Amino acid sequence: MIVGTIKARTKVLPPHLSSFSFGILLFKKYHVFMPRKWTEHELLVAMNLYCRLPFGQFDQSNKHIREIAERMDRTPSSLSMKLCNLASLDSYHRDRGVKGLPGASKLDRKVWADFQQDWTGMAERSETAFESLAGLNSIGTSEPEIVIDLPTGPSETERTVKTRRLQRFFRNTILASYENKCALTGMAIPQLLVASHIIPWSENEERRADPTNGLCLNVLHDKAFDRHLITFDTDLRLVVSNALKTKDIPEFQSANFANLEGTKLNEPHRFAPDERALEEHRAIFAA
């Protein structure tokens, strides 16, 4: 009966009432909650959380989802559903036959597309929005990966803050995508894991926060990858430079390089490494 009454009364909205005011009246009379539209700021927070949490941890019972939902003044189920809406836009999941939750809004699609077109700019905006919910940076692992000189003025301070935000976003996204394990060895000690850039941070500003430009490696193989002493072929199998496997080499070196040659990378559950970026890396590999 209430639903029929509401439908009947919403056909003709009194001219002196806005839709918002009419919604308030409906709530007061019938105790009906009108759905609250998601804002772009909220979607920036949701996208940040989508990147921080491993796929499969989007359930409303997740303590991080419950905490953030409370700070956003939303229900855990609302935030959980939004994360699943975002998953439905992820081409990597679609290619695997994982559909996510249908019903993504136009704004959802716009924000998702903005990230794909400008990871660096959107990552900074997203991380800033996430920071506005104070005390939530404990989600993920946020250890800095690049040594930064102390700022000497306002512009340097701003640059340093931006750099740290991008590093934090990139690291959290990469580690979550690889389920906090080294893609080569399976090591699962966060303190010894690095979000490795395929195209170096210093060489391409546009790809600094792009998760398809990253791999999760342990500190040893990250350093070797950064120095182009190892790379990965088109089948994502490890290729080792002769410099690491010729002459008399220590057992440790042999065990961690020569003996691992041909090992296939464990692929992430989203944001697969970009083949073109890996091709660039192979082009300067120190064979």
Image: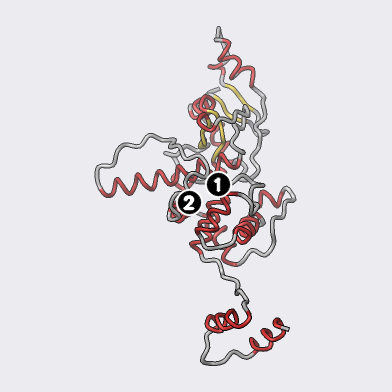
What amino acid is at disc 2? Ala
Question: Is residue 74 at least partly visible in the picture?
Answer: yes
Query: In this orientation, which residue lies closer to the viewer: 278 or 175?
Result: 175
Query: In this orientation, which residue lies closer to the viewer: 43 or 22?
Result: 22
Quadrant of the rendering where the C terminus is positioned: top right
Q: Residue visible at 65% across and 43% down?
A: 269
Residue at the far bottom in the pictured view: 15
Q: Position of residue 87 (x, y in %)?
A: 64, 54
Query: In this orientation, which residue lies closer to the viewer: 52 or 241?
Result: 52
Q: Nearer the viewer, mark 1 or mark 2?
A: 1
Q: Bin the neighbour count of mark 1 within 10 Å (Cα to Cα): few under 14, some 14-19, many 20 and up.
A: many
Mark 1 element type: helix
| Residue 156 sits above or below residue 12 on the image | above
Quadrant of the rendering where the N terminus is positioned: bottom right
| Residue 36 sits above or below residue 54 on the image | below
Which is nearer the N-term, disc 1 or disc 2?
1
Q: Residue visible at 59% across and 61% down?
A: 75
Residue 216 is drawn in which quadrant? Answer: top right
Q: Residue visible at 61% across and 66% down?
A: 105
Residue position marked by numbered label 2 in the rendering: 123
Number of numbered markers: 2
What amino acid is at disc 1? Arg
Q: Position of residue 50 (x, y in %)?
A: 58, 51
Q: Bin the neighbour count of mark 2 within 10 Å (Cα to Cα): few under 14, some 14-19, many 20 and up.
A: many
Query: In this orientation, which residue lies closer to the viewer: 141 or 206?
Result: 141
Residue position marked by numbered label 1 in the rendering: 52
Q: Position of residue 164 (x, y in %)?
A: 40, 43
- Are dots 1 and 2 in contact, CB under 8 Å? no
Q: Residue visible at 46% across and 51% down?
A: 127
> Is 41 left, or right, of 268 in this rendering?
left
Distance of label 1 from label 2 (alpha carbons): 12 Å
Mark 2 element type: helix
